[in-house]
Image: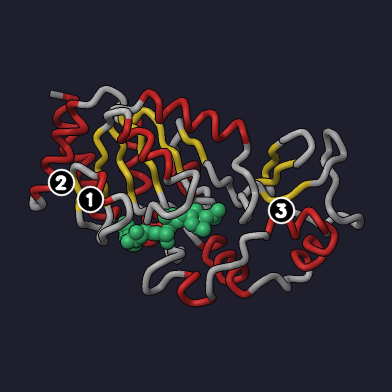
C-alpha cells in the first residue's frame, strides 16, 4: 500500500465495531458529475442558489412544474441534470458495495442525489438529500420511481395514493430533511464508532453536523478527500486521495484482513 495514511485507515476500520460512511459529491466526481464547491464546482460556476427554493416551490408548485416540463429551470439544474442522466457508478461506488458485503461497512449516509450508490448495489443506504430518480409526495411521503415520466395534463402531478403535491425526492434548498431519513441517519450515527467521510466538504447542515455528533460521542473520523475540508480538524486520519483510488485499495486490504 503506497499511502501510509490509507494503511492507517485500513487498520482503524478493521478495529472498529460499527463503521458508517458519509459520502458527498467527490464520490461521484469520476462518474462525470460536478461537485458543488471548489474550482470546477457548480456553485463556483453559477453562484450559490437562493436558500428559499423549497419555499418558492410551495408558493407555486404549478409554476415550478411548468418550468420543469418546458426545460426552463435554472442553468445549474440543467447542467447537473445532463450529467446525472449520463452517469454510471464508478470504482469508488463499487468498492463501497464490496465493503458493505464484507460487513465492514454497516451503513452509508449519502448527501448525493445521483442514486449511483443504490445503482451500484449498496443496500444499507440512507440518501439524506434524496434521490433524483424518484418522486416524493409532500402529503403522505410516498416515494415512487420516476421511470419514463410522462407529465400529466394537470400540474403539479398529483400523488397516486393521496392526491397530494409531488416533487422530486431530492431535497431543495430550505427544505427540511424528510424525518424518516433523518431518524435513520441519526440511528446509524449513534451506533457508529468510526465515520468514513468520503468526498464531502462538510459544509451543509444538518448532514455535516452528524460527523460532529459522532466525533463528540467518541467516534474516530477518517476523511478521504484530496483536499482539506471543514471536517479535517476533527479527523484522526486524512487520506489525501481521490475516492476512486483510495476505496478500491482499502477494499483490497480489508478483504484480506476479514478473510484472514
Ligand atoms: P461539495 O462540492 O461541497 O464538496 C465536494 C468535496 O469533494 C470537496 O471537499 C472536494 O475536495 C472533494 N472531492 C473532489 N473530487 C474528489 C474526488 N475525486 N474524490 C474524493 N473527493 C473529491 O459537495 P458536498 O459536500 O457533497 O445539497 O455538498 C453537500 C451538499 O451541498 C450537496 O448534497 C448539495 C450541496 O448544496 C443538496 O443537493 C441538497
- The x and y percentages for residue 58 are 78, 53
Residue 217: which quarter of the image? top left
- Name the quadrant of the C terminus: top left
Residue drawn 17% across and 33% down?
A: 12
The residue where tag 2 is placed is 6
Label ID, residue 148: 3
**Callout 3 secondary element:** loop
Horizontal side, residue 121 vs residue 68: left or right? left
The structure residue drawn at horizontal position 30% and vertical position 40%, both measured from the top left corner, is 196
Give the foreground label among 3 and 1. Answer: 1
User: Are the residues at dot 1 and dot 2 in contact (C-beta closer than 8 Å)?
Assistant: yes
Which mark sits nearer the N-terminus, 3 or 1? Answer: 3
Mark sitting earlier along the chain (2/3): 2
Q: Which residue is mark 1?
A: 246
Which is nearer the eye, 143 or 9? Answer: 9
Relative horizontal placement of residue 124, taking residue 51 as reference (left or right): left
- The relative height of residue 18 versus residue 45 in the rendered view (above or below) is above
Query: What label sits on residue 162 in the rendered view?
Result: none
The residue closer to the viewer here, 51 or 28, is 51
Amino acid at each position: 500500500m503506497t499511502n501510509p495514511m490509507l494503511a492507517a485507515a485500513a487498520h482503524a476500520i478493521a478495529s472498529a465495531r460499527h463503521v458508517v460512511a458519509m459520502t458527498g459529491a467527490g464520490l461521484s466526481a469520476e462518474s462525470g458529475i460536478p461537485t458543488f464547491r471548489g474550482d470546477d464546482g457548480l456553485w463556483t460556476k453559477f453562484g450559490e442558489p437562493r436558500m428559499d427554493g423549497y419555499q418558492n416551490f410551495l408558493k407555486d408548485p404549478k409554476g415550478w412544474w411548468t418550468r420543469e416540463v418546458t426545460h426552463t429551470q435554472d442553468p445549474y439544474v440543467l447542467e447537473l441534470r445532463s450529467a446525472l442522466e449520463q452517469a454510471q457508478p464508478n470504482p469508488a461506488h463499487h468498492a463501497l458495495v464490496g465493503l458493505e458485503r464484507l460487513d465492514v461497512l454497516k451503513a452509508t449516509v449519502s448527501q448525493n442525489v445521483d442514486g449511483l450508490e443504490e445503482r451500484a448495489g449498496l443496500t444499507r443506504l440512507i440518501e439524506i438529500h434524496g434521490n433524483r430518480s424518484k418522486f416524493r409526495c409532500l402529503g403522505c411521503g410516498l416515494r415512487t420511481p420516476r421511470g419514463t415520466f410522462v407529465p400529466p395534463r394537470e400540474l403539479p402531478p398529483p400523488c397516486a395514493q393521496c392526491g397530494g403535491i409531488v416533487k422530486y425526492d431530492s431535497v431543495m434548498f430550505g427544505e427540511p430533511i424528510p424525518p424518516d431519513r433523518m431518524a435513520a441517519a441519526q440511528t446509524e450515527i449513534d451506533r457508529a464508532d468510526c465515520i468514513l467521510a468520503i468526498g464531502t466538504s462538510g459544509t451543509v447542515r444538518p448532514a455535516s453536523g452528524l460527523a460532529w455528533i459522532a466525533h463528540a460521542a467518541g467516534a474516530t473520523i477518517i476523511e478521504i478527500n484530496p483536499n482539506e475540508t471543514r471536517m479535517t480538524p476533527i479527523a484522526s486520519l486524512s487520506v489525501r486521495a481521490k475516492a476512486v483510488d483510495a476505496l478500491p485499495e482499502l477494499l483490497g486490504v480489508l478483504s484480506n484482513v476479514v478473510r484472514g
